[in-house]
Amino acid sequence: MAGLRERQKADRHRRILEAAAALFRRSGYRHVKMEAIATAAGVSIGTIYNYYRNKGDLLVAIVSMEVHDVLAAGEEVVARPPRDAGRAVHDLISIYLEHSLVYLSKEMWRHAMAISTQQPDTPSGEIYTELDGRLADQVCALIARLKALGAVREETDERAVGELIFNNTSMMFIQFVKDEAMPVSALLDRIGRQNAPLIGLIGTPAHG
């Protein structure tokens, strides 16, 4: 019985988040009322407020849903990466970026980033920061895996390199969400060019 209740609760959460994401994308984050989200999700407004204090909490929960999806997909790359370091990094970063607009629009990302910078000590701000940390950790884990496979030089500091790659990706993603016209393909091309010199330095002669 407890298992059924947990599944029902998870289903309600998912319905609420998917309804909110669809409405935010269609009408714009600022214009959507919590009551409209409740109606679209088929739940009472009280149910939503049992889980989320405001729209900002809902938005960060959608970001969390997005990040958990890409982390799960990224695990496959970390476990079985291409033996070419550049290709492996590209494959992981591509998962992050190509999925970035599945649940969220660029406008939604801008609001979520504002929450993380303007309200860093709130639960939502802390969740956003924690999610960024998990993505950075996964990039570091990929570099460590490549080093174990001999595709990256033994003397490489996997933590420093992983954080450098993630931090640059994060900075470029901010530029991407500020530019409504920029496609994901252009973002990936830019990041690939920026990563190339670093990959050239850390890759082994046989795999660089």
Image (cartoon, grey):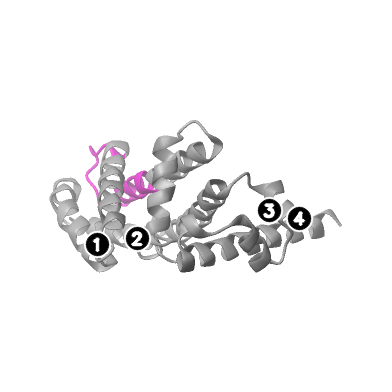
Please name the residue shown 46% across and 45% down the image: 131
Q: Residue furthest top?
A: 121
Please name the residue shown 39% across and 37% down the image: 117
Q: Which residue is mark 1?
A: 188
Tell me the tag on residue 97.
2
Q: Residue furthest right?
A: 1
Q: Amino acid at mark 1?
A: Leu
| Spot occupied by residue 95 in the image (x, y as percentages of width and height) | 37, 62
- Give the magenta part as a residue range: 137-158
Please name the residue shown 53% across and 65% down the image: 23
First reached walking from the N terminus: tag 1 or tag 2: 2
Tell me the tag on residue 48.
3
Q: Which residue is mark 4?
A: 6
| Spot occupied by residue 49 in the image (x, y as percentages of width and height) | 68, 48
Q: Amino acid at mark 2?
A: Leu
Look at the picture and state if 185 lies above or below 78: below
What kind of element bears circle 3? helix
Which residue is at the front of the view, 181 or 139?
181
Instruction: Residue 14: tell me if it is visible.
Output: no
Query: Does 5 lie within the magenta span?
Result: no
First reached walking from the N terminus: tag 4 or tag 2: 4
Q: Do tag 2 and tag 3 residues touch (Cβ < 8 Å)?
A: no
Instruction: Find the distance from the CA under tag 4 to the CA under tag 2.
Output: 31 Å
